Image (cartoon, rainbow, N blue to C red):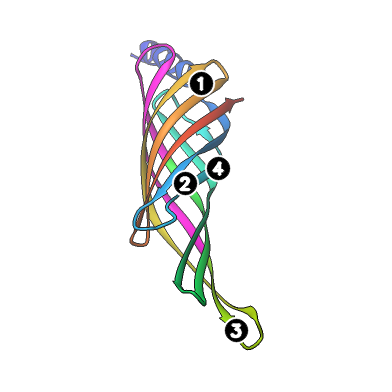
Amino acid sequence: MKRLLAPLCLLIAGSLQAESGFFVSLNGGYTEVQDSAANTDSATGFEFGYKMNENFTVKFGVKDFGEYDDSARINDSTRISTESTLTSRNVSFVYSLPLDDSFTFNAEVGYLDWKFDSETTLSEYDDWRNRWEHTSTTSNASDSDFAWGLGLAYNMSIIELGFNFNSYKFDKTDVKETELTVTYYF
C-alpha cells in the first residue's frame, strides 16, 4: 500500500505545482452606481495573489472606483454640486473551471473594506457683491461588505486576459462593474 501511495502523492503534488504560482494583475473597467444621477465612471485596480491549483485562487487587491460628480441648479442664484470618490481593499477567493486548454470560467467571492469621500459645494450669487459665494462641506464613510463576480479568462502560458462582471454592495448602494484584466504569473 505504501508503494502505491508515495507515487500517487508525488503525481498529485507535481500536477498542483505545475498549475500553481504567484501572480500580479492590473484591471480596468466601467462602473455603474445604482440610484445616482452621476452613476458611471471608470475603475482601475491592482491585485496580487497565489493560484493554489487549476481550480482555487486567493487574491488581494486595491481598487479605485473613480470620481462621481453631480450638480443641480436650485434657482438662478443657487447651485449645488457634489464630487465623490470610492476606493476599496479586498481579499477574494476564486473558483476556476477550465473549459478547455485556454479558456476558464471563474466564480469569485470576496470581502472588502471600502472608503467613500465626498465634497458638497453650495454656490449662491451675491447680488450686493456681484459675485458667487461658495460654501463647502466634506463627508466620508467607510465599512466592510461582501462582493461577488463571474468571469471568463484566456490563458496564454504566463499571461492571462480576463473579462469579469463584479457586483459590490457599499452600505445600501449597489455598484456593478465590467472589467478587463491582465494577469502575469511568475
- Kind of residue at disc 4: Thr
> In x, y percent, where is residue 119?
55, 69
Q: Are marks 3 and 4 in contact (CB under 8 Å)?
A: no
**Which of label 1 and label 3 is nearer to you?**
3
Q: Which residues are magenta?
A: 93-116
Which residue appears at 57% of the width and 30% of the height? 22
In the rendered image, the residue lying farthest to the bottom is 128
- Kind of residue at disc 1: Gln
Label 4, label 1: how far apart the Cα atoms are:
30 Å
**Which of label 4 and label 2 is nearer to you?**
4
Name the residue tied to disc 2. 91
Q: Are marks 3 and 2 in contact (CB under 8 Å)?
A: no
The tag earlier along the polypeptide, 1 or 3, is: 1
Name the residue tied to disc 1. 17
The tag earlier along the polypeptide, 2 or 1, is: 1
7 or 37: nearer the viewer: 37
Q: Which secondary structure type mostly characterizes the magenta part of the structure?
A: strand
Asked which quadrant contains residue 152, the reply is: top left
Asked which quadrant contains residue 131, the reply is: bottom right
- Kind of residue at disc 2: Val
The tag earlier along the polypeptide, 3 or 2, is: 2
